[in-house]
Every structure is written in structure tokens, then in C-alpha cells.
Amino acid sequence: MTYKISVIPGDGIGPEITECAVNSLKSVSERFKIDFKMIEVKAGDIALKEFGKALPDSTLNQIKSSDVCIKGPVGESAMEVIVKMRQLFDLYVNLRPAMSLPNIDSLKENIDLVIVRENTEDLYRGLEFNAGESAVALRTISKKASKRIAEYAFKMAMKRRKKVTVVHKANVLKITDGLFVESVKEISKQFKEVELSELYVDACAMNLIRNPEDFDVIVTTNMFGDILSDEAAQVAGGLGLAPSANIGENFALFEPVHGAAPDIAGNGTANPIAMILSIKLMLEWLSNNKKDEKCLNAAKAVEKAVYDSLKNNIKTKEIGGTKKTKEIGNIIASSILNYKS
Ligand code: GGG
């Protein structure tokens, strides 16, 4: 089986960290005898400049014919690229794990949580318009989308510590968040073994700092999930270490949580780990979706390579190391190649 992967390097630090992820995938391919056909496509500010469109048709067509997509961060065109792709491909789950990593300073120890962010609705539908001297954005929340994200979160909790926290602001957004919470509660009835609790988003923001180790699965709406996942990533050690997966029924896209960081682009100091751990999530998804045991073993190898590098202090400056992007990428790629199960 050959897996066709669309690769979007993106903007800013995107190309540097994507190169590291691609090198890791080449090692995976060699070590585990998994065939990848990687096709580079353009999207983001760079594509806007070159083609007049941040998400050109040629890019979209290539992605449509792929099994999966990996994507670096894009600059100012996030709405036209990633938010649009989530809707176009109905990538309704945004998985954003935050966990304690070896030799990484975090606010607390033993953090192991995952934010399950609804990925297609809310204010991110982009229904914004001017109204005279005002501007209006519409927040859409549907029962269908709320129930399917809840179902995903509960299924995930069943494989973890069996705790789901639904995060909302239904004391203020009574109708929209009211519908979201009620939908989650309805789905919870099918998962009697899972403990469901609820938190207002402001309280959740506070508790992520106070006791992040208590959280298992957080399920929430799109914008709250976006904001809380940056916070959770920082609490666990930094955005440069935070991977994510955008998942639909039969297609998925993997990207770091962080943005394009134009201030450090090109100087070789970007941390490639969030992008490489996104590759690990991709391999796990392939193993589940395509029933491919080799991909699961490869995911373990990627994780081990990253953990070993951190243990050996192979880190970028922002997390206390001295290594450059490429050096880290090369060390991790070679460690995957030499992986012993
Ligand atoms: N703060 C991290 C960042 O800039 N992430 C890129 C971004 O905003 N993506 C849009 C999204 O995830 O909804």
C-alpha cells in the first residue's frame, strides 16, 4: 500500500519545520517499509502572492486525491487556508493533546490531557459582515456537530482515563452553548462508564493553570478550543511542542498548533517537534483508519525518537537548549532509522 501525502510547507518557519517532518517520514519509510508518496503543494501567504489565492485549486485538487495531508503553519491567511479546509473536507475533530514531556519545564507534572475541539462551526464559520457603523459575526452551533464531536470525545475517553469535561459559557451564551452542553449530555448517556463534568470556559482557563493534571478529555466549541489549546500547550512546556490533528470520516490533516512565527523565520531556531509529533498523530490515524499495524509501530518510533532527543537535551533555545532546527530534525530522523522495538 502506498500512502499519498500532500505536504504544505506554509509560511514563516513552516518550510524549515516541514523539511524536518518530511525527513522523519523518509526514515519511517525506510525503517518500517511503508511506502509514502509525498507531494509538495503551496498554500498560505506564499500562494496568495504567487497565484492570487491562498488555497489554489491545484492545491485543493492534489489534496483531494491524497490519503492524508501534513501542513506547516500559514501566516495571515489561516482563515482562507486551514479554517476553509476544515469545512471543505468536513474535518470536524481537532485533537490537541498537551502532555508532560521528558526534560521539559512545565507548570505542573504529569499533564496528560487532550482537547477535542469542534472544528467546523462557531464564530469560525466566517459569517462576518459590516452593519453600518458596526460589525457582526454570527456564531453557529448545531445539534449534529455538537453530538458528533461529543461522541468522538467519549470514545476517546474510553481509551484513556474515562473523564470528559465539557467546556462552555452557557450562563451567558444560553442558546448556542446551551445547545452544545445539552447535546454532549445526551451523548454521555451512551457512555455510562465515563465521568462527565462541566466547566465554564473562564474557570477552565484558570484550572488549566491550577491543576492541569486533573484533566483527561476536554470537549468544547471551536473558538474556546483554539484559545484553551494554546494555553494548555504553554502550561505543558510550550507551543513549539504541541501537535494537532484535524480529523474527518475518511481524511485527516496534521499540523502544529503554533503559527508561522515570522519573527524567527529563516534563522534556524524554530522548534520542529510540534510538527514531528504531528507526524506521529498521522501515523496513529493511518494505523486506525487503514488498519495498518506497521504505522502504529512507526508512530511509537517517532515518539521514542522525540522523547530520547529531549532526554539528551537536544532542544532549541526557547526551551533551554542550544540546537538548531536542522540538527534536531537530523538527530530525530536518524534515531527513527535506528529504532529497535
Ligand atoms: N496561536 C497559534 C496560532 O497562530 N495558530 C494558528 C492558527 O491560528 N490557526 C487557526 C486555527 O487553529 O483555528
Image (cartoon, rainbow, N blue to C red):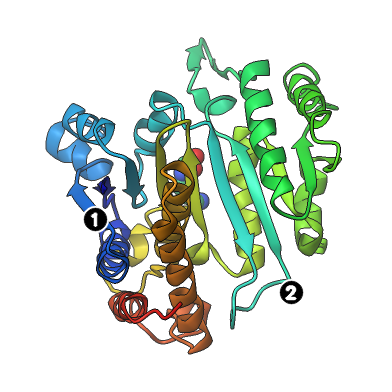
Check disc 2 and give the amino acid type.
Answer: Glu
Check disc 1 and give the amino acid type.
Answer: Asp
Q: Is residue 228 visible?
A: no
Q: Distance between the residues labelled 2 and 1?
A: 38 Å
Q: Which residue is drawn at 28% across and 70% down?
A: 27
Label 1 residue SS: strand
Check disc 2 and report the residue beneath it: 109
Q: Position of residue 181 (x, y in %)?
A: 79, 27
Mark seen at residue 243? none
Q: Where is residue 336 in the image (x, y as percent from the top left)?
A: 36, 75
> In the picture shown, does residue 276 fall above or below 178?
below
Mark seen at residue 35? 1
In the picture, measured across the screen, residue 15 lies left or right of residue 70, that is: left
Q: Residue at x 29, y 60 (%)?
A: 18
Label 2 residue SS: loop
The quarter of the picture where residue 167 lies is top right
Dot 2: few (<14), some (14–19), or many (≥20) neighbours within 10 Å?
A: some
Q: Which residue lies furthest to the top in this view?
A: 132
Q: Which of marks 2 and 1 is nearer the N terminus?
A: 1
The quarter of the picture where residue 171 lies is top right
> In the picture shown, does residue 90 fall above or below 231?
above
